[in-house]
Amino acid sequence: MAASPAPDATTAALRRFNRFYTARIGALGGRFLDTPHTLTEARVLYELGERGPATAATLAQALEVDPAQISRTVARLLRGRLVSRARDPEDGRAHRLSLTAGGRREFQRLDARSAERAETLVSSLSASDRARLQDALRTVEALVSGQAPSRAVLIRPHRPGDFGWIISRHGALYAEEYGWDGSFEAFVAGVAKEILERFDPRVEGCWIAEVDGRTAGSVCLVRKSAAVAKLRLLIVDPAARGLGVGQRLVDECVAFARRAGYRKVTLWTNDILDAARHIYEKAGFERVAVSAPETAFGKTQIFETWELGLEPRRR
């Protein structure tokens, strides 16, 4: 008999991971998470607990399981009085399945045990490693399913350590995309140092954008005078472009400036930063000054000043 063809490296890696993970989550041995239920029974209970009443056909499609196996599984759950069945009001030929009170308790027990097992697996990971794991899992799901990964955007206040990312990302990104030298990273580090040393949360703010749990952008608003605030250090990582991250960061700045009672927001930018200039223009900023060409950061630069007038704070 001819030998089976050897799997390629990707297939072998996927099979190895499957063997590793099914053992870790308690899917082997015929009983899931040390309960009386098989993995399929547990998944049916979970689907009904999360989704609500559903037909057997719907469950088979959602779980990608043969309808005959779903029928056998549902029969066992009916006998155990964990699931009830009633005629579907929208289709008299079908039945809708629902959890009973006992089924709801069993679903909650399984859900709690599954969450506890998952937390045990990641409990020793640092925050950065958890973010890497989330990103890797989303990538696997997207690649294997053929669907685009989710792009969840979160704007939050800065935390300790965020300014390290801001400095590093500015230095690397502007060197890569515009050929600016190391003096720009030193300049950003100086701005960051000044913000951190003088930061007054009553009238100043710094916001970080996260996309799918990973840092993807930043912006700061600092006090220039009692009436004027300055927007600084706007950056959006290339991996997050096209998601409206930059606009959301600038909008957060402007909204804060209004609440803080500023009459104007000003900023300093460069004529080659088309994406940023478009964001400022869309937010209502207007260019009010343009510098003569000068040498900075290893390149010839033309700098621009933009301003946004704000309505006075109502008292």
Image (tube, helix red, strand yellow):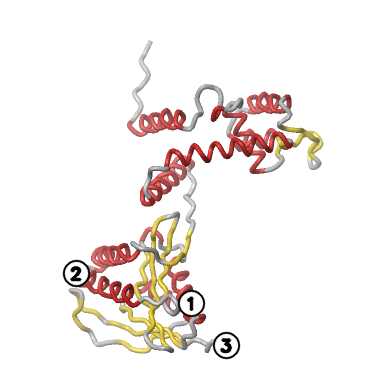
- Disc 1, SS: helix
Identify the image quadrant of residue 303.
bottom left
Residue type for callout 3: Arg
| Residue 142 vertical placement versus 287 (above, below) | above
Looking at the picture, how far across and down is residue 134, in whole percent? Answer: 43, 47
Q: Quadrant of the N terminus?
A: top left
Query: For mark 3, what is the residue?
Result: 314
Task: Classify 10 Å Cα crowding around label 2: few (below 14), some (14-19), many (20 and above).
Answer: some
Return the mark for residue 181. 2
Identified at 44% across, 31% down, the residue is 24
Identify the image quadrant of residue 222.
bottom left
Looking at the picture, how far across and down is residue 32, in whole percent? Answer: 55, 28
Report the mark closest to the observer, 1 or 2.
Answer: 1
Task: Classify 10 Å Cα crowding around label 1: few (below 14), some (14-19), many (20 and above).
Answer: some
Task: Classify 10 Å Cα crowding around label 3: few (below 14), some (14-19), many (20 and above).
Answer: few
Residue type for callout 2: Asp
The CA span between labels 3 and 1 is 14 Å
Identified at 72% across, 32% down, the residue is 83
Query: For mark 1, what is the residue?
Result: 256
Residue type for callout 1: Phe
Q: Is residue 14 left or right of residue 88?
A: left
Identified at 24% across, 87% down, the residue is 292
- Mark 1 or 2, nearer chain start: 2
Looking at the picture, how far across and down is residue 45, in whole percent? Answer: 64, 35
Nearer to me, 171 or 94: 171
Q: Kindly indicate whether the residue at mark 2 contacts the one at mark 1 (C-beta within 8 angstroms).
A: no
- Disc 3, SS: loop
- Mark 3 or 1, nearer chain start: 1
